[in-house]
Amino acid sequence: MDNNTIIQTDHLVKRFPIGGGHFTALEDIDLRIGKGEFTGLVGPSGSGKTTMLNIIGSLDDPSEGDAQVLGTSIKNIGARRASTLRKKHIGFIFQTYNLMPVYTVFENVEFPLLLLKMSDSERKKAVMDALEWVGLTSKVKSKPKQLSGGESQRVAIARAMVKKPELVLADEPTANLDAENSHNILRTMEKLNEELNTTFLFATHDDKVIRYLKRIIYLEDGKVVGDEQVKK
Amino acid sequence: MLRFFIKGLIRDRQRSLLPIIVVTLGVMLTVLGHTWITGILGDVIDFNARFSTGHVKVMTSEYFENIDQMPNDLALLESEAFIAELQEKYPDMTWVERISFGGLIDAPDEEGETRAQGPAAGMALDLLSPESQEAERLNLQNILIKGTLPTSPDEVILSDEFASRLEVEPDDQVTLITTTMYGAMSITNFTVCGTIKFGVGALDRGGIIADISGIRYALDMEDATGEILGYFPGGEYPDEKAITLTENFNNKYADEEDRFSPVMVPLRDQNSLTGMIDIIGYMSGIIISIFMIAMAIVLWNAGLLGGLRRYGEMGLRLAIGEHKGHIYRSLLSESVVIGIVGSVIGTLIGLLFASLMSKGIDFSDMMEGSTMMMPGVYRTQITLESYYIGFFPGVLATVFGTALAGIGIYKRQTANLFKELQA
Ligand SMILES: Nc1ncnc2c1ncn2[C@@H]1O[C@H](COP(=O)(O)OP(=O)(O)OP(=O)(O)O)[C@@H](O)[C@H]1O
Ligand SMILES: [Mg+2]
């Protein structure tokens, strides 16, 4: 794995037990994703996009083969080291924003930093910076209930970005958003990708997202069926 | 970090309010139950102390061995000097003489022939000295059914049941037939001055009470007494103090060679009261266990429901990089906070109710009338224990309930929890 590679899978296989046998969700995947990429896993429902993101995010383990993420092997990583990898280096964005309803916008964004040792003033500044990136400094004290879908997803992006992770995994981030909001948050992510050189990996089948991708990896039935760099 | 979770806890009513209410209720009932039991059993002990055991009792060692036979031939001699000595050695205590005796009560007709007769269990105590507290100690005035208390040495009170069986009324004459301290036959006439209800079966069948001077005369016990009862100031039985005093006394006075040497026996070693005193301890344990188990079950289920509701949060926290064990521990910390808050509130409310009822709730209207044994008033008694006893079930049950509920969450695979995020 060279210095510029952030994700590399080798003969990655994922099987889920069902009934007496098993279902193969990912079949022999070999991929390499470099630092600073803005890449999407694209494919129909059930093609294995989420499964792939889960393994890369060390939330699930491979059945066979391995995935190297930031130089760490996901096979046999162990729960503790997996959580450390996520805590320090990976940000997640979900289709359903998953903001914690009892906390304010500020507190939701602050939470990942509480897991990292950081002084109060550093933390406060980092949170305000992140909210600045997504243009939500005016909603600091709002509760998630008071936000629109687009605003909620922007808070989720701020939460994923606040610790300046090397890698952001975004699973269908626009599925619940209208066109305008989708473009909005994608432009935000594009900007963060350019300014902070954060690697983004999407799972999506949404054209609005696909248009922004710089590299598209096509999945079908758990196999890579295409991989194209988009010339802009 | 903990501050962050406590903030969430306070804001999330569903997560905090229900468990706190459950804990508050359980703790309140624990505290109240504990004060009731302490109060009721305390009353039983109190009754025994007043009526027969004192807080400590001094007798000859041989008398103590045969106490059921009321062996006045084994009485303490030179009791007046002995009492004075006790009073001097232990000046903050109150010492009183009692004589228990058995015999027959004979009710004569006009010619002086026996009309009715029955076995009597008698107790003699100082009812005539102006400084004596004995009548109050036995609550005699309040349990009087007919007539008055004795005003002279030749008067007796009979249990009301006994009196009606003998068909005697106040002012009638009765004869006490018994033996003197020296074993001779003794026949003495008394005037019935009143009747009382003891509320204890055996005593209601044949109980009589007389002033100690009259009984001394009848039993030929000049300057002698069967028992000397000692009371600590303040009324409540102080078990440990009584034991210490007893050891101290017996070291000085008891002499194994001498059957007539005085021994002191604390309340707990008389009338099988050891069991009673220990029961207070057990009952507290039982109450705590019952409420703890009940609360733990409720909180476990509440925790499971809350946990279901929070799968999303758990999954998110996992994704953000919180370790499973850390999440589990944070749930337990939340439960400790809830347990403590609920216990504080529950204890305060419990103590408030307990203190409102510490004067007692009067059930005597519902019962047949107050008796010596059952004053008809049930009261709570707040002890030092009442202040902290609720915290055991309160905190333990919440932690335990959460721990059980948490295992369910903990056991779920990371990926499954994570699935909640994609729903
Ligand atoms: N825990 C599981 N147990 C059994 N089968 C599973 C499990 N998780 C995923 N699968 C199966 O694996 C396949 C790929 O699932 P995955 O969630 O990765 O699809 P996806 O590409 O993200 O689809 P979508 O676009 O609908 O989100 C599906 O057929 C799914 O049913
Ligand atoms: Mg998916």
Image (tube, grey):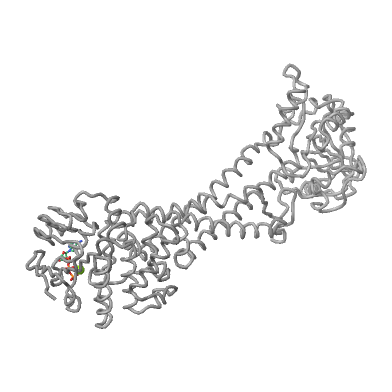
The residue furthest left is A225
Residue visible at 90% across and 32% down in the picture: B217
Q: Is residue B86 left or right of residue A220?
A: right
Task: Indicate whether A152 appears above or below A126.
Answer: below
**Residue B55 place in picture, x, y as percent:** 74, 38
Q: Nearer the viewer, residue B195 or B85?
A: B85
Split into quadrants, the picture shows ligand 1 in the one at bottom left
Q: Is residue A167 left or right of residue B126?
A: left
Q: Nearer the viewer, residue A135 or B96?
A: A135
User: Can you tell which quarter of the image residue A192 is in?
Assistant: bottom left
Evaluate whether residue B207 shows in this view: yes
**Residue B63 place in picture, x, y as percent:** 75, 27
Q: Nearer the viewer, residue A210 or B164?
A: A210
Task: Indicate whether B317 appears above or below B264.
Answer: below
**Residue A101 place in picture, x, y as percent:** 40, 70
**Residue B79 place in picture, x, y as percent:** 86, 28
User: Can you tell which quarter of the image residue A10 is in?
Assistant: bottom left
Q: Nearer the viewer, residue B327 or B210?
A: B327
Say which quadrant the C terminus of chain A sits in. Answer: bottom left
The residue furthest front is A195
Residue visible at 40% across and 74% down in the picture: A137
Evaluate whether residue B408 shows in this view: no
The residue furthest top is B257
Number of numbered discs? 0
Q: Is residue B366 left or right of residue B298?
A: right
